[in-house]
Amino acid sequence: MTLLDGKKLAEEIKLEIKAEVDQMLASGKRAPHLAAVLVGQNPASKAYVSTKIKFCEDVGYGSTLITEDENVTEERLLSIIDDLNQNDAIDGYIVQLPLPRHIDEERINLAIRPEKDVDGFHPMNFGKMAQGMEAFLPATPYGILEMLRRYQIPTEGKHCVVLGRSNIVGGPMSILMSRKGYPGNCTVTLTHSKTRDIGGELRRADIIIAAIGIPGYVKADMIKEGAVVIDVGINRVQDASKKSGFGLTGDVDFAQIKDKCSFISPVPGGVGPMTVTALMLNTLKAAKKIH
Ligand code: NAD
């Protein structure tokens, strides 16, 4: 079994991005600039945003953090988005999800200028992705593609089973794995909460991409010998051995299935660091287009 070490890959890609930024600066261009909008005090959201800002610092990007109170109005958020859309010093930005209940996430997403949508959530980017056109790919699926590419995992003609159909992970992942090219050219089955026999579907899979948010859901008797398993899940579970009282675990039962797989991504240290890295690659792309 080979561990898909997202943390190590992210460090490698970080150096590559930094070298590109140095080159941009040497040729008289400015560094890429990412902005993040953070609403409220959700601890996970705060942690994600600070990881993104730290990554910007590490590679030499400029960054702007806009924080708003939990009670911010939708109109105020839309006006912030409008400013970000118009600000030429900002190449790309993200609005950290989830947003408070009184804010219409769809309306916010639609207001983001597609050319600055480095999270790749806008329907314009999603539609282009689905048609195989040049687009900002959603960060988590893009990070997974980069992981498959860098570990040179064969995908052509393979049967890929995606678990979960969200707009940010499972849905786009199923499209990307079936697209022409590498990584891709898979025969894809997209499974979800209404699928009748998930175990049966998973047992036929050469590649499993699990994104449902249920700790340890995929067990050893659900996978075939030699399967490639990408675990996207990030679930908080009680862990008395940790100072915080909780630990993070994925959607697959790592201890149980690791010896049955050919490749497996751990949680933490697998898809998570690749997601942030993909966001940074999208920001670099946005900056290059503007320059
Ligand atoms: P979501 O909650 O939006 O959607 C969950 C999906 O799982 C739905 O499509 C649902 O149909 C399916 N599902 C739920 N219960 C099921 C069941 N019993 N059997 C089969 N399918 C079932 O999920 P999401 O936003 O895609 O997130 C999924 C997981 O991935 C979460 O743990 C989340 O924290 C994690 N995540 C990780 C990253 C990362 O960077 N590593 C990024 C995004 C999400």
Image: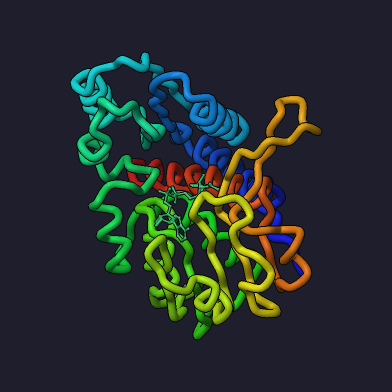
Instruction: Please identify the residue farthest to the bottom as the structure is shown.
Output: 157
Rendering colour mode: rainbow
Location of residue 268 (image quadrant)? top right
Which quadrant is the N terminus positioned in? Answer: bottom right
Q: Nearer the viewer, residue 257 or 111?
A: 257
**In the displayed structure image, the side of residue 248 where residue 202 appears, left or right:** left
Q: Residue furthest right?
A: 241
Residue at 45% of width from left, 35% of height from top? 32
Residue visible at 53% across and 30% down?
A: 44
Q: In the rendered image, is residue 87 in sight? A: no
Q: Measuring 71% from the left and 28% from the top, which residue is drawn there?
A: 245
The residue lying at 71 percent from left, 58 percent from top is 254
Residue 99 place in picture, x, y as percent: 35, 30
Image location (x, y in percent) of residue 249: 65, 46
44 versus 131 height, above or below: above
Q: Is residue 253 visible?
A: yes
The quarter of the image holding the C terminus is: top left
In the image shown, does 139 or 200 lie closer to the viewer?
200
In the picture, measured across the screen, residue 239 lies left or right of residue 232, that is: right
Residue 40, position in %: x, y? Answer: 41, 19
